Image: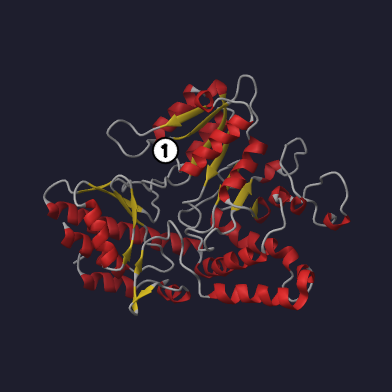
Amino acid sequence: METSYDYALSLDAADPLREFRDQFVIPLREGREQIYFLGNSLGLQPRKTHGKIKEVLQQWSDWGVEAFFMGEHPWLDFHEKLADPMSMVVGALPHEVVVMNQLTVNLHLMLASFYRPTGKRFRIICEAKAFPSDQYMLETHLKFLGFDPDETIIEVSPRRGEHTIRTEDILQAIKTHESSLALILWGGVQYYTGQVFDMETITKAGHAAGAVVGFDLAHAAGNVPLRLHDWQVDFAAWCNYKYMNGGPGAIGGAFIHERYHGDPSLPRLAGWWGYDASRRFKMEKGFVPDRGAAGWQLSTPSPLQYACLQASLEIFTAAGMPALHEKGRALNDYLIRLLESIVREAGERAIEIITPIKNPEKGCQVSLLMHRKGKETFSALQQAGIFADWREPNVIRVAPVPLYNRFTEVWQFADCLRRML
């Protein structure tokens, strides 16, 4: 029954979040809605986005630069309106979260504050084959400080013949390098395999070793449950154009735990938008940070980017994170069950699911290692109107997301895959 289309229809009918799909613009081809499983790359456009942008443009038209201070929604405090809903997404206190810049810029800023190498403690632990922007960020940041990346960075890899990284191997690396470890910078969700890492355990182990612990949450924010404050994470950064639906090149986000907010000795690279908001326009010499994470801001932000993210955050708030996570797990479980059925029917090693399927916590993404007909299958999915992602050398990534994907779309994807194999 579970592999039937009627069963998928029954799941959609019982879905308490089914009406939220109507709040997004679904891509069309020849008048027919496509199946969009690329929320892990670029989220779909909320229908509210157009109106939010139009409102900012009208403010610009009506008030010019005075729109920062005038009108029903002045731009000056726009970022404060985004802090509450954003903190709900990442499990933080509102003053621990700030919407600013883009992901890699924010990671550089976080390292400027939290990577404080000494003669003995200077090494950084990270995942092997992290997303390239993280690799390049670490490499260039270390070279800028005069360190050799090859001597400084300790990468933890999957074991031979495995695709994902075991938690015990991460903990062993922390223990092995305990005396020389300054920082752990890890991903919340691995972009290639979709593996959700045990961030709470990594943080505890890192702190026990005397290291600072930060996370890149590009594939985690809006996807998996996060409790950054309770986990005592030191810092985190993320983009808002994937699961957060903030638009291409969307403004990013950062988290700094409140225990650091009152530490004047903590260095930072500052800008005027991070200056004390109550005194910012006095234009005085000497940097005085704004309260909380907002004190890490740099330049005057774009209200247009704020507006795009606000449109999505309003939907997240209405849906509620517990309900979104529950449906996300249900979509993932249903997809896995269908894929396991296909693997059994294929009768040979045609597909390998490299995303951990027994993890207690699952994200939206499932990665399929194609042992045969990889490119042919991917092309067939495209022809069938299914948006998926091809990663060299032979992986297809799909990510049914709870806000706008249906169980029947998962069934259609699996049916297309079955017919190809």
Query: Would you place residue 116 above or below residue 340 in this image?
Result: above
State which quarter of the image contains the N terminus: bottom left
From the viewer's perspective, is residue 407 above or below residue 114? below
Given residues 168 and 165, the one toward you in this image is: 165
* Residue in the image at 70% along x and 51% along y: 297
Choose between 227 and 251: the one closer to the eye: 251
Task: Pick the quarter of the image with the C terminus.
Answer: bottom left
Q: Position of residue 406 (x, y in %)?
A: 34, 69
Determine which residue is flagged by label 1: 129
Dot 1 crowding, Cα within 10 Å, few <14, some 14–19, many 20+:
some
Residue at position x 46%, y 51% from top? 219
Task: Write down the quadrant of residue 300 in the picture.
Answer: bottom right
Residue 274 horizontal/vertical position (percent): 74, 51
Q: Amino acid at mark 1?
A: Lys
> What percent of the width, then of the height, locates residue 290?
77, 51
Identified at 22% across, 71% down, the residue is 5
Helix, strand or loop for disc 1: loop
Where residue 47 appears, x then y in whole percent?
51, 75
